[in-house]
Image (tube, rainbow, N blue to C red):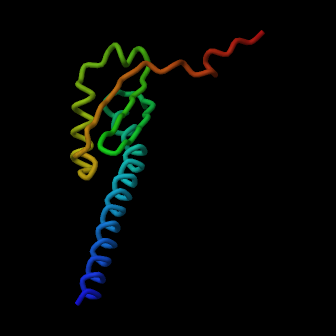
Amino acid sequence: MNKFFKGLFTIGAIAGIGYIGFKGYQRVSEVIKMSKTLPDYLQDLLNEKPKISINMRLNSLAIAVGMSAETYESLNIDLTEQIQCYISDYYPSIAKLKISVTKYIKAADDAECEINV
């Protein structure tokens, strides 16, 4: 009987670790997919393709959105709410995380600022 419970406990532990691993893989996979699709979604809203930087922690997600100064000044929508709605609609497994959105003005491209001597 002791061998039976030891085997049952071993199977339960392996199943639990497998489930946690699967959920972690699912979160990472959806963050990777979101990093590819979120700039296109925001391009439709902002009329410019922003630079997106995503940092994922255990229970939180930090998203930094870089845009030009003109777009940043003329921003008339709540970008944080739009991004959270997008995540809850298309990526429900990461919608449960604490999401923080930061907006910043991205630097001008080096090709535009190059000076010919």
Q: Is residue 79 above or below residue 18?
A: above
Give the percent coordinates (x, y) of residue 105: 43, 18
Identity of the residue drawn at 39% across and 55% down: 29
Give whichever of 18, 27 is nearer the camera.
18
- The N terminus appears in which quarter of the rendering? bottom left
Q: Quadrant of residue 115?
A: top right
Judge whether 37 appears above or below 48 on screen.
below
Q: Quadrant of the C terminus?
A: top right
In the displayed orientation, state which residue is furthest to the top: 117
Q: Quadrant of residue 67?
A: top left
- Going by the picture, which residue comes out furthest to the front? 2
5 with respect to 115 (left or right): left
Residue at 31% over, 59% down: 23
Residue at image position (34%, 13%) is 73
Give x and y (percent) for residue 102.
Answer: 34, 26
Q: Position of residue 104 (x, y in %)?
A: 40, 20
Q: Position of residue 25 (x, y in %)?
A: 38, 58
Residue visible at 39% across and 50% down in the picture = 33
Seen as rendered, the residue at the extreme bottom is 1
Please tell me which residue lies in front, 18 or 107.
18
* Front residue of 95 and 7: 7
Q: How many marks?
A: 0
Residue 72 as seen in the image, left or right of residue 89: right
Front one among 62 and 49: 62
Query: Residue 24's image quarter?
Result: bottom left
